[in-house]
Image (cartoon, rainbow, N blue to C red):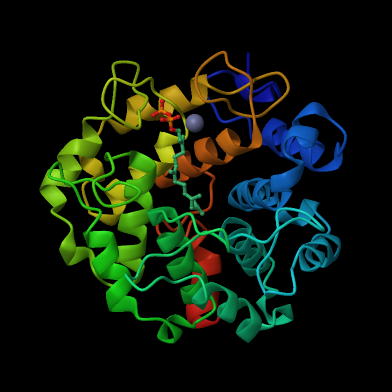
Amino acid sequence: MNCHMNTNVQMGELAVDKHVKYIISVEKKKDSFESVVMEHLRLNGAYWGLTTLDLLGKLDAVDKEEVSSWIMKCQNESGGFAGNIGHDPHLLYTLSAVQVLALFDKLDILDIDKVTNYIVGLQNEDGSFSGDMWGEVDTRFSYIAICCLSILRQLDRINVDKVVNYIVSCKNLDGGFGCTPGGESHAGQIFCCVGALAITGALHHVDKDLLGWWLCERQVKSGGLNGRPEKLPDVCYSWWVLSSLIMIDRVHWINKDKLVKFILDSQDMENGGISDRPDDAVDVFHTYFGVAGLSLLEYPGLKAVDPAYALPVDVVNRIFFGN
Ligand code: GRG
Ligand code: ZN
C-alpha cells in the first residue's frame, strides 16, 4: 500500500489545506459567533489570519484590493487605525494595518507622515508609549511604536534612546521584562521588550544567559511552553517564548521535537485551525501562533518568519532591501 496516495493528513503532520480553508471561512463568515465577538478587533484578526496564509504560501487566496480598501476605511482622522470601521483608533490596530499592507506590498497607499504623527504623539516624557489617547502605558506599546516606525522607516522621528531606557527600566532580576517598571515577567511582555531592543540594535541590555534560562524553563512535560512559572502550556507561547529565544540565540536550549509534537497535537484535524492546547476549540490567533511557531522551528514547507517583526522574512527583506 502506498500511504502517499491517501489525501487525508494524518495526526503528526501539519494539515495545511484544512488550516487554509479554516482561515478563509473565518474571514468570510462575518456573522458567526467568533466574528461577532471579534468585531471590534477585526483588523487584528485580519493580520493573524493573513500572515498565517502567507506563511503557508496561500496569500493569493484573498482579494488584496478588497482587504486594503477596507483597511483604509478603518483609519481615523488622527492618523491611527481602529479595529473596524467607525471604531476608536489604537496602536494595536495601527500595527496590524501597517503589517497587512506590508504583506500585500501596498505600504505606498499610506500617508506615512499622518500615521507617523499619530504614533509619535503617543510617546510620553519618560520614553514610554500610551496605547491611545486614554493613556494606558505598557511595554506592548513600546514594541508596537518601534516596529511600526521601523517598517515605515521613520525611527528618526522619536527619541529612540528614551524608548530603550524605559524598556530597560522594566527589566527584572530574573532577566525577564514586565508591562511597566516592577511588573512581573511574562513571556508576552518579554517578546515585546526583546523585539523592540532587537529592532533598535540594543540587545546588549539583555542578560542572554539569564533570560535564556528563564525562557527555556517554560517548557513543560508535554513539550508545550507556558508564559510564566506554574501556568498551563499554551500554543501561543510557541510564538512569544520561541521568538524571544531566537532573538537572543538560545533556541537550542529547548527540546524542539517535543514542542513540534505539542503544536501538531493541538490541530483540529477535521475542520482545520489550531487551539491553545490539545482538544480545545480552535481560533485564528492560536492558528497563527502554531504555524508561526512551527516556522520558527523550521518545520518543512513553511515560509520563514522574522522573530522581531512577526512578518515573513521575504516581506521584511522587501521592506528594507527592496526585494
Ligand atoms: C505583532 C506578534 C505581534 C504582537 C503585537 C499585542 C502585542 C504586540 C503583544 C502582546 C504580548 C502579550 C502580553 C502576550 C500575552 C498574551 C496572553 C496569552 C496573555 C495571557 O496572560 P494570562 O496571565 O495567561 O491570562 P497565562 O498563560 O499566564 O495563564
Ligand atoms: Zn494562548
- Horizontal and vertical percent position of residue 9: 64, 23
Q: Among all residues in the image, which is located at the extreme front?
A: 134
Q: Is residue 243 visible?
A: no
Q: Which residue is pictured at 74% across the width and 33% down the height?
A: 37
Foreground: 317 or 98?
A: 98
- Horizontal and vertical percent position of residue 168: 22, 61
User: Does 53 appear above or below 11?
Assistant: below
User: Does 68 appear above or below 29?
Assistant: below
Place residue 200 in its image quadrant. Answer: bottom left
Indicate the quadrant of ligand 1 in the picture.
Answer: top left
Q: Which residue is pictured at 65% across the width and 50% down the height?
A: 44
User: Does 298 appear above or below 123?
Assistant: above
Q: Is residue 291 visible?
A: yes
Foreground: 60 or 215?
A: 215
- Horizontal and vertical percent position of residue 116: 56, 79
Foreground: 58 or 63?
A: 63
- Horizontal and vertical percent position of residue 33: 80, 27
Q: How many marks?
A: 0
Q: Which residue is pictured at 68% across the width and 74% down the height?
A: 78
